[in-house]
Amino acid sequence: MTKGDYRPEQLAGRIEELISRSPIRAYIPRPDKAPVWIPVNEKGYFVLTCLECLRSFSVPPEPSPDELRETECPFCAARVCYLRTI
């Protein structure tokens, strides 16, 4: 059949068939990590924001062989992980 050859009942049936075969919503897994820009203050410290209490605090840029760093929020003691890429 070509475009326009369908009767309204056929078209409605085809639409219903296509809808029944497809998932309601595609499943897209969420990543564990998302990149975020971490500002550096005038003294060269990283300014992190705690994901638990949403407060910001400064962390000195310490030399380390690891890019992945972890620190504790001084306000709520939650673990804050970040990547050093500079």
Image (cartoon, grey):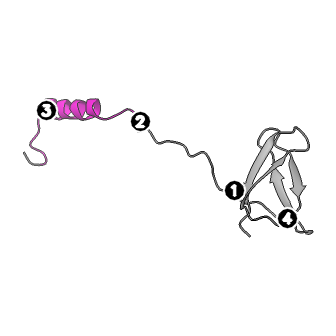
Crowd class of label 1 (few under 14; some 14 to 19; many from 20; radius 10 Å): few
- State the SS at label 2: loop
In which quarter of the view is residue 18 placed?
top left
Q: Earlier in the sequence, mark 4 or mark 1?
A: 1
Q: Amino acid at mark 3?
A: Gln
Q: Earlier in the sequence, mark 4 or mark 3?
A: 3
Of tags 3 and 2, the one toward the viewer is: 2
The disc placed on residue 10 is 3
Frontmost residue, 17 versus 57: 57
Q: Earlier in the sequence, mark 2 or mark 1?
A: 2
Query: Horizontally, is 16 left or right of 50 in the view?
Result: left
According to the image, label 2 marks what residue? 25
Q: In whole angstroms, how far apart are the C-alphas of marks 4 and 2?
A: 44 Å
Q: Are marks 4 and 3 in contact (CB under 8 Å)?
A: no
Image quadrant occupied by the C terminus: bottom right
Q: Earlier in the sequence, mark 3 or mark 2?
A: 3
Q: Are marks 2 and 1 in contact (CB under 8 Å)?
A: no
Q: Earlier in the sequence, mark 4 or mark 2?
A: 2
Q: Position of residue 25 (x, y in %)?
A: 41, 35
According to the image, label 4 marks what residue? 61
Q: Amino acid at mark 1?
A: Val
- Identified at 49% across, 42% down, the residue is 29
| Region rendered in magenta | 3-25
Frontmost residue, 25 versus 46: 46
| 55 vs 18: above or below | below
Residue 78 is inside the magenta segment = no
Residue 24 is inside the magenta segment = yes
According to the image, label 1 marks what residue? 36
Question: Magenta span: helix, strand or loop, mainly?
Answer: helix
Query: Horizontally, is 26 left or right of 12 in the view?
Result: right
